[in-house]
Image: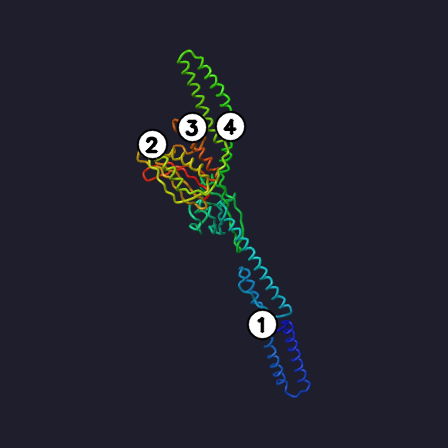
């Protein structure tokens, strides 16, 4: 191994020049042999030294070739191999050491970056908000488990799919859903990052219906509190006055009329008290609950009251985090409504289905009937709205309030079940 490439190169050049000059000078001075012999000997010695010089230049070319290969590997973020130094001192040795140091520094930075990316992806996996990563060619490369709340399938099923096939497009205003229905519920936020020299798009889908629902609920609660206060203040003296007048009435007809007034006052007070439940804050006592015993309890409750109506169970998800008493009350309300819907459509032969299944990272509980479905889906969750003759429009609103207090989601819709159409209530709760 040579200690100094430059020094050896300089020595070879000096030796070459000195030998050639010395030989030619000596031979010409002595005139011991013809000039052509002197020239031949000088040329042979010079050729030998020139060959040694060519070898040194080949060595130099080899050094730059290895350096070029190393730089290309670093450009591709491949640090599996490193060049080995061939010199201990000199400019070439310094160049080799700097190249090795650069490779180690970049390798360290890449390792640290990979560690950060790994932590970020782990964090993404644990979030309940759908997060999608697209490549530079707008193809899905990664997503978290909450992806299923958007597309009802694990993200691996769509890996490599184009953004357009997923109903997404990138415009000058940013990423957005092609479907107005999806766009009305989900708000997209996007950012970009680079991995292995390629640009990736990171999309975060935020469910804005929850925020809108909270504002709407707060407005309804304020309205209900004001109305309840005013009605109570008016009904209490009217009821008291009707009772006093009934005691002084002389005829049965007058007492009957005053009794009706008092009865209606009590009915309105009860009506207002029920709506007051919506304005109260609900604090669920959340725990791990086994769903099948809870479903069975609701099934048994209605089996004796409505023997002609079948309440079927399909419990694929076995447990979830909830308040068991509140969830049972919600299920009782929903099953009662479903049975009444079935009876309105046909007195017998219809089924109410309670089912649960996993929609990672959540559990979905559904109550479905075969009563023809909701006639007006736009207003079905509006307080005071009901299509029943004696309905008060509180059951679904209260149920929605309870589920949302569990950090869950409450959806209503219609679906085709065989030859029949029915309503389906979908409740999404933490697993």
**Percent coordinates x, y for residue 297 in the rendering:** 38, 38
> Tag 3, which secondary structure?
loop
Whole-number angstrom distance, CA of label 2 to CA of label 4: 35 Å
Mark positioned earlier in the residue sequence (2 or 1): 1
Mark positioned earlier in the residue sequence (1 or 4): 1
Residue identifier under label 4: 225
**Location of residue 368 with respect to 269 vertically, above or below:** below
Q: For mark 2, does the 10 Å Cα neighbourhood hold few (<14), some (14 to 19), or many (20 or more) residues?
A: some
Relative side of 260 to 94, left or right: left
Whole-number angstrom distance, CA of label 2 to CA of label 3: 19 Å
Relative side of 209 to 90, left or right: left
Residue identifier under label 2: 343
Q: Residue at point 43% right, 37% down?
A: 327
Camera-side residue of 276 and 164: 276
Camera-side residue of 114 and 6: 114
Q: For mark 1, does the 10 Å Cα neighbourhood hold few (<14), some (14 to 19), or many (20 or more) residues?
A: few
Whole-number angstrom distance, CA of label 1 to CA of label 4: 91 Å
Residue identifier under label 1: 59
Whole-number angstrom distance, CA of label 1 to CA of label 3: 94 Å
Q: How is the image coloured?
A: rainbow
> Tag 2, which secondary structure?
helix
Image quarter in which the C terminus is found = top left
> Tag 1, which secondary structure?
helix
Mark number displayed over residue 157: none
Residue identifier under label 3: 392
Mark positioned earlier in the residue sequence (3 or 4): 4
Mark positioned earlier in the residue sequence (2 or 4): 4
Whole-number angstrom distance, CA of label 3 to CA of label 4: 17 Å
Whole-number angstrom distance, CA of label 2 to CA of label 1: 95 Å
Callouts 1 and 4 close, C-beta under 8 Å:
no
> Tag 4, which secondary structure?
helix
Q: For mark 3, does the 10 Å Cα neighbourhood hold few (<14), some (14 to 19), or many (20 or more) residues?
A: some
């Amino acid at each position: 191994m040579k200690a100094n490439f430059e020094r050896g190169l300089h020595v070879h050049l000096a030796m070459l020049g000195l030998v050639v000059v010395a030989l030619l000078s000596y031979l010409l001075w002595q005139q011991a042999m013809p000039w052509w012999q002197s020239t031949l000997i000088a040329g042979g010695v010079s050729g030998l030294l020139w060959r040694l010089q060519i070898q040194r230049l080949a060595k130099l070319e080899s050094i730059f070739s290895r350096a070029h290969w190393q730089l290309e590997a670093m450009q591709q973020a491949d640090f599996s191999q490193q060049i080995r130094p061939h010199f201990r001192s000199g400019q070439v040795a310094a160049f080799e050491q700097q190249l090795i140091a650069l490779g180690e520094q970049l390798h360290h930075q890449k390792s640290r970056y990979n560690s950060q990316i790994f932590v970020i992806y782990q964090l993404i996996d644990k979030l309940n908000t759908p997060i999608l990563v697209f490549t530079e060619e707008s193809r899905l490369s990664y997503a978290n488990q909450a992806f299923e709340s958007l597309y009802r399938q694990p993200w691996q099923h769509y890996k490599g799919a184009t953004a357009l096939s997923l109903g997404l497009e990138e415009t000058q205003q940013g990423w957005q859903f092609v479907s107005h229905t999806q766009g009305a519920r989900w708000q997209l936020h996007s950012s970009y990052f680079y991995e292995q020299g390629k640009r990736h798009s990171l999309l975060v889908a935020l469910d804005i219906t929850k925020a809108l629902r909270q504002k709407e609920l707060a407005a309804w609660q304020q309205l209900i509190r004001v109305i309840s206060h005013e009605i109570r203040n008016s009904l209490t003296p009217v009821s008291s006055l009707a009772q006093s007048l009934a005691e002084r009435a002389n005829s049965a007809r007058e007492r009957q009329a005053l009794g009706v007034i008092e009865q209606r006052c009590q009915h309105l007070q009860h009506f207002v008290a029920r709506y007051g439940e919506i304005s109260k804050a609900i604090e669920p006592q959340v725990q791990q609950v086994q769903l099948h015993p809870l479903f069975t309890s609701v099934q048994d409750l209605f089996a004796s009251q409505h023997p002609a109506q079948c309440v079927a169970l399909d419990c694929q998800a076995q447990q979830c985090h909830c308040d068991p008493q509140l969830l049972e009350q919600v299920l009782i309300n929903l099953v009662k409504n479903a049975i009444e819907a079935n009876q309105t459509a046909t007195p017998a032969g219809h089924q109410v289905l309670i089912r649960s299944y996993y929609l990672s990272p959540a559990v979905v509980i559904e109550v479905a009937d075969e009563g023809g479905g909701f006639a007006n889906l736009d207003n079905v969750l509006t307080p005071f709205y009901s299509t029943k003759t004696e309905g008060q429009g509180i059951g679904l609103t209260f149920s929605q309030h309870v589920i949302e207090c569990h950090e869950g989601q409450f959806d209503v819709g219609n679906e085709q079940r065989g030859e029949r159409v029915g309503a389906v209530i979908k409740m999404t709760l933490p697993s």
